[in-house]
Amino acid sequence: MTKKKQVWFDVEEHETIEQCLERMKKEGYMPFGRREEPIFHEVNGQPTVLRQKIQFKGILIEEL
């Protein structure tokens, strides 16, 4: 099975950015882009930021 040329990797809730980047490297990808978006939840009827969702776009290392 061939790997996809580009894959988005989520930084898991209990994972550091460095751990995510290391996981990408082990799977044969290097970071090529990053995006973030807030995750909201409702407190007393008001939207409140729960945490930040971080994703890295990985490209196959052998494609370079």
Image (tube, rainbow, N blue to C red):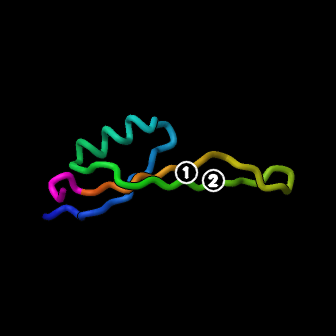
Q: Is residue 30 magenta?
A: no
Which residue is pictured at 38% across the width and 58% down the height?
8
Which label is found at residue 11?
none
Decide which of 26, 32 is in the foreground and name it.
32
Image side of residue 2 versus residue 7, left or right: left
**Local crowd at mark 2 within 10 Å, few (<14), some, or many (≥20)?**
few
Q: Residue at x 39, y 53 (%)?
A: 9
Against 35, residue 51 (above or below) is above
Residue 33 x %, y %: 40, 55
Residue denoted by label 1: 53
Magenta-colored stretch includes residue 62: yes
Q: Residues within 10 Å of mark 1 (few under 14, many from 20)?
A: some
Image point (67%, 47%), residue name: 50
Instruction: Give residue 1's quadrant in the image.
Output: bottom left
Q: Position of residue 22 (x, y in %)?
A: 31, 38
Q: Position of residue 40 (x, y in %)?
A: 69, 54
The quadrant in which residue 58 appears is bottom left
> What element does badge 2 sit on?
strand
| Farthest front residue in view | 64
Q: Secondary structure at mark 1?
A: strand
Which label number is shown at residue 38?
2
Chain-order first, disc 1 or disc 2: 2
Q: Nearer the viewer, residue 45 or 64?
A: 64
Q: Is residue 40 left or right of residue 35?
A: right
Q: Position of residue 30 (x, y in %)?
A: 28, 49
The single residue placed furthest to the right in the displayed view is 44
Report the number of numbered marks: 2
Q: In the image, is residue 14 above or below residue 44? A: above
The answer to whether the residues at label 1 and label 2 have Cβ atoms under 8 Å apart is yes
From the image, give the main secondary structure of the stretch colored magenta.
helix
Q: What's drawn in magenta, residue-wise? A: 60-64
Callout 2 amino acid? Pro
